[in-house]
Amino acid sequence: MTHDSPKHTKLLSFHGDILTFQCKLSYPRDGESRRGSELAFSRLTFQRDGCTFLKGNGGMAVINRKSSSNVDIVSCTFALHVKNRVTSPCILLIQNKKGDVFKYSLLTLSNSNRLEPHMEFKLPYRMKDNVTILQGPTVLWSHAGIVFYTSLQAGEVRQIPIKLSLNCIGEFPLNKRKIFILGYQTQSKECLKDQLDAPGRSKTMGYFVEDGQVFNADLILPHAYSSITQCVFVISAEEVNSVLKSTVVAATSKKQLVYFENGIPREVCLLPFEEPQHIQMVNTGRNGCLFAIYFNDGQVCAVWKDTFQVASCWSGVSSLHVDDFLSCGTDQMLLVFGSQSPPVDPVDLFLITDLCGTTYSHGQESSEGQQASDTAQENYLLTVQALQSRLQSGLTLLQDFQSDVRVKERVLRQSVQALTDLVSGREHILTQTEQEGLVSLWDDEPEDEAIHEKRQVMPVVPPPLVDNLWHRVIEDRLIVGVILSTESAIIYFCSSSAESVTLSILRERGQSQMPAVIQTHSQASWFPTPSPSSPYSHPEPAAKRSRRAGASGAHATHRLAVTAVTDLTPLLTSCSVKCPIMLHYVHRQGSSASVTAPGPTVVQCGQIQVDIQVKHHPQLMTNSQLTTDEAREDLLSLLAVLDAWTFLIHSPDHTLCDVAGWIQTSMPCERLEISPHYLLANPAGPSAVMLFHWQHKTPFLGELSVHCSQFKVLQFLDSLFGFLPASCSILHLRQGRGDGTAPRLAHSLEKEVLSLKQGVLSLLHGEEEEMEEAKKSSGVKKMEPPDPGSAEGLQRCREEWQRDRERSRRLLSPLVGVERYRRLTQSLTQVQLEGDVAALLETQTLI
């Protein structure tokens, strides 16, 4: 589709190139007194390197050698030639002859770049309205409310036999009867007079040009839209049982783009401009399809087919073309912009884009249309990336849940089978634990000789090295800590196995040969703490974080600290106390050291001396600017002795405010120089110490960790609720120290297994009781053992054997009452629901 431009030049896209057609006067030759007319054409090919169109081969055709009458191009497009089944460019020319006679010539461009005349016809008027060239080639137009057409098959100019007030002309992708006309059926005055009382005096009709058949136009456009529709594009059409099924889009005079399916409107998009002229579809491949609409006064807009929303708009466009200009297998839009000064080249200012990341422009870098296109493309790409991240994390979480369900079902089946064998008195044979995927926590049985020999051959890895051992006293609590070397932490532990490292405090040996173990609370943590992400950075997908978390180099720059906290008062039986410190750890499968020493291992770290007269209080509470190793040990001691509370703050309506700044000014707090991510508040002694760690995950989400007592955290939350907007929500992710979600999940799973065991046993015992009661009610008494030698004794043996067989069958395949089974399933469902809630809380804690 092309439009008028300066110098009567027409542009047409064909097979990825641009064809230019221009009518001009030819110079007079020898023996000729007048100048003739000729039609010149050229082929332009887009070059990516220079971002320009290069002129290729062209040609010229003489229209009239002896007449200087004006020759102009009415329309140019490409159409299917029905004889040779080849699609060729077609150019319709008009030439003013003598008087009011106009001569029309239809030319086609062959594959050999030659303009060949196709047909000619004359009309007593100039074509003005709805000139269309369709397959055949067939030329259709309207004049004085009547539709005409001509082609080589018709051999003359013909008139549509029915009177239609033309609405639109189109082409269906059918095997037969492709060209159609839609319009109002014009009725005579007598018919209108007879139908004055009828509710509808006009009817929308459709007409097939090939065979002259009339059809109901409501199958394409409803009657209410026919009067306002200005252009139509057919997406698909087929005939099913002689019924036309179609999918079309139509642009109306009400600034609407309507999607119709079998004559029923499905989607409506509000267009930004008025007076649409034609619609084209742009197939961008896997990114979807676009509808490109050209409007009057050189305005263009693109609408996504999937979302039916406006993607971008442009103004000042002289022509719009859709083709594969980049030779990449998908379509792009070529927008040729007009110029105030006469352009040197017909395609001087242009833009090639598919609104999916591909854009080439010349002279339009600062245009408003290009900026709108970039903005729409950026929003589209950000939306796709966010959806892909959500889909990836959702699939990973779904796979984890499916794996847990499979393990749970396998364990339940094995448990039911073991319980059934136990009640039936059969021996339950267990398979090897390696095949079942079960690992015992403490295995005191001797190992196989093959495994022992295999471990003797493998290299021996030395035990973890302890870089530092320290202890602090905070009020009546003793904190002991060790720091492992970086190499040992990487070899022995990872982020998933650091929880298996514990620290024990022993009493000094006295009369007993075995030292007593002091009850402590131990925890392990990596330091320094990873820096929080930028407030405006986008978080990585959960699946990507889970894969990177287990990488061997994830903690290459971090060290592992293990702390233990105990009550100081029972230790101070004398002025000075010496306590040996022991490190316990369990090798996990997959670590490089697990092949040499599987199971629990103990390493002696040294001993500490606690003296009442020596002060071991943290100096960090009085000077937050310390950067020494002792300051780092003070921070680890405070984290170990204080209760930890973690809150997830979500602001759904607007971006989250500066929580860290508010904490620093309202408490007041000082930022620790040794670890700037922590804020320290110490208004009145060790009992009032508070540590804050704020991490901004997204512009609308943040995580706040508070280390203090329970009373202090309640006071802090009261102040925080007064600072945050009412729309913010605060979710408590973890409980206080020692009351996490992992014990709750373990307790729920244990309760689920016990409930299943007790439920099955109650069903089986209830069945046995019913059998015994039935036996008593039947009057069967205890008799002497039967004598198999007599006929009566043999009959009694058979009856006893039959009863035992029936009892065994009912025990193996018990039949229970509906009410009892319903109560069991309800109780088990409630227990499983509690386990699912605990599992959900555990997963939220790990995020």
Image (tube, rainbow, N blue to C red):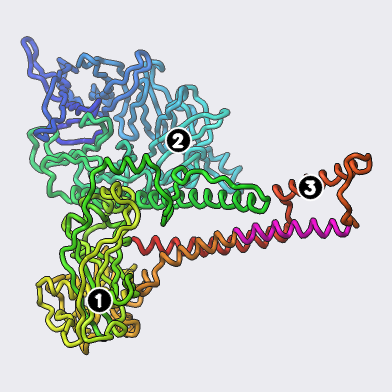
The answer to whether the residue labelled 1 contacts the one labelled 2, judged by CB atoms less than 8 Å apart, is no
Can residue 60 be spotted in the picture? Answer: yes
Amino acid marked by disc 2: Leu
- 774 magenta-colored: yes
**Quadrant into which the C terminus falls:** bottom left
The residue tagged 3 is: 804
Tag 3: residue type?
Asp
Question: Which of 678/88 is in front?
Answer: 678
Q: Give the range drawn in magenta.
A: 757-778
Residue position marked by numbered label 2 in the rendering: 182
Q: Can residue 521 be seen in this view?
A: no
Alpha carbon of mark 2 to alpha carbon of mark 3: how far? 87 Å
Viewer-proximal residue among 122 and 179? 179
Of mark 2 and mark 3, the one earlier in the sequence is: 2
Along the line of sight, the residue nearer the viewer: 201 or 250: 250
Residues packed near mark 2 inside 10 Å, few (<14), some (14 to 19) or many (20 plus) = many
